[in-house]
Structures are given as structure tokens and as C-alpha cells.
Amino acid sequence: MTADLELHHRVSQFLFHEARLLDEQRWEEWNALFAEGGEYWAPATPGQPDPVNHVSLIYENDLLRKVRIARFKSPAAPSLHPFPRTAHLVSNVMIGRSEGNDLSVNSRFLMVEYRRDNQRSFAGAYTHDLIDEGDSFLIRRKKADLINCEGPLESSSVWF
């Protein structure tokens, strides 16, 4: 039981750290949490089977995350000025399966975005496929299932 609690604590702290990096706009540090070939995916419909054969709200690999980060930093992107401020809340962390160094972790999230006197909320479920590196984790895939993914959504410049 102690080992299970320790693992749960380590995983929870990792997810909280990831959320903080996003909120503090520490993009390179956040991107470094991904394993080589790691993916970020936000499906466009509930139960969407994969991001390759179906349209997604967001589907990014290593290259596309780097392109987005470069755009965030570019003064030639006036649509991002002022840059949105966010608060990501992560809760209900549950470790689903564990095989060797691979973990599947489910949690719930609420992300509030504020920009130009407008505040929006996004909520849903995360699934993180993690690689346990001993002292930390790497993200193999992060999936953000928005509760209203199939509804009308204004685009968000930031990651859920």
C-alpha cells in the first residue's frame, strides 16, 4: 500500500508541475516533459478512436509543438498579443494500468483562460500515458477530452 501511495503522490506532483509550466508559459520546459515522439491530442468528438484518421481539435507531435512554441514567442503573431493567461486545475488522479515503466493515468481538469477582458472555461478528462523514469516521468501521449468537444468552440491559442 505504501508503494501505491508513493506512486500516486509522484504522479500527482508531476501532473501539477506540468499544469504549472503551462500556466507560467514555460513552454520549453513543458515540451521537455514529452518523450521523443510524444503526442498531444484533443479529440473533436467523444470516443474518437484515433487522431490520424479523424479530425481533431489539436494533434501535435514533437515538430508541431515546437512550431507552436516558436509562434508564441514571435512578435510577428499579433493575434497572440496580449498572450492569454491561464489557470489549469488537475484533480481526481487515478492510475489506470501499470506495465513495466509505462503508466496510464486518468484525471479531470478545468482550464480557465483570460485574454482581452474575456474569460473562458474548458473542462474535461486527461489521459496521460507516462514512462516512469525513476525520479520523474516522460509523457508518451497526453489526451485532453473536452466535455463539449463536439460543440461550437472558439479556437484557443493555448493547450488545454
Image (cartoon, rainbow, N blue to C red):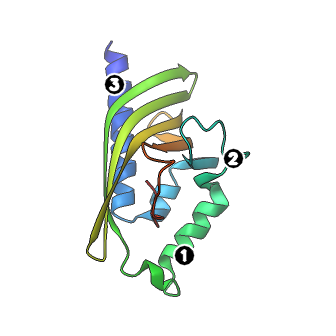
Check whether the beta carbons of the residues at disc 2 and disc 1 lie within 8 A of each other: no
In this figure, which residue is indicated by the disc labeled 1?
71
Q: What element carries label 2?
A: loop
> Quick check: 53 above or below 60?
above
In this figure, which residue is indicated by the disc labeled 3?
6
Residue 132 visible in the current orientation: no
Report whether 157 appears left or right of 19: right
Q: Please identify the quarter of the rendering in which residue 115 is found.
A: bottom left
> Quick check: 124 above or below 158?
above
Query: Mark 2 or mark 1: which comes first in sequence?
Result: 2
Given the image, on which type of amino acid does mark 1 rest? Arg
Given the image, on which type of amino acid does mark 2 rest? His
Query: Mark 1 or mark 3: which comes first in sequence?
Result: 3
Q: Is mark 1 on a helix, strand or loop?
A: helix
Label 2, label 1: how many angstroms apart (C-alpha)?
25 Å
Question: How many residues crowd around disc 2 within 10 Å: few (fewer than 14), some, or many (20 or more)?
Answer: few
> Quick check: 116 above or below 50?
below
- The residue lying at 36 percent from left, 33 percent from top is 10
Given the image, on which type of amino acid does mark 3 rest? Glu
* Coordinates of residue 75 in the picture (x, y in percent): 48, 86
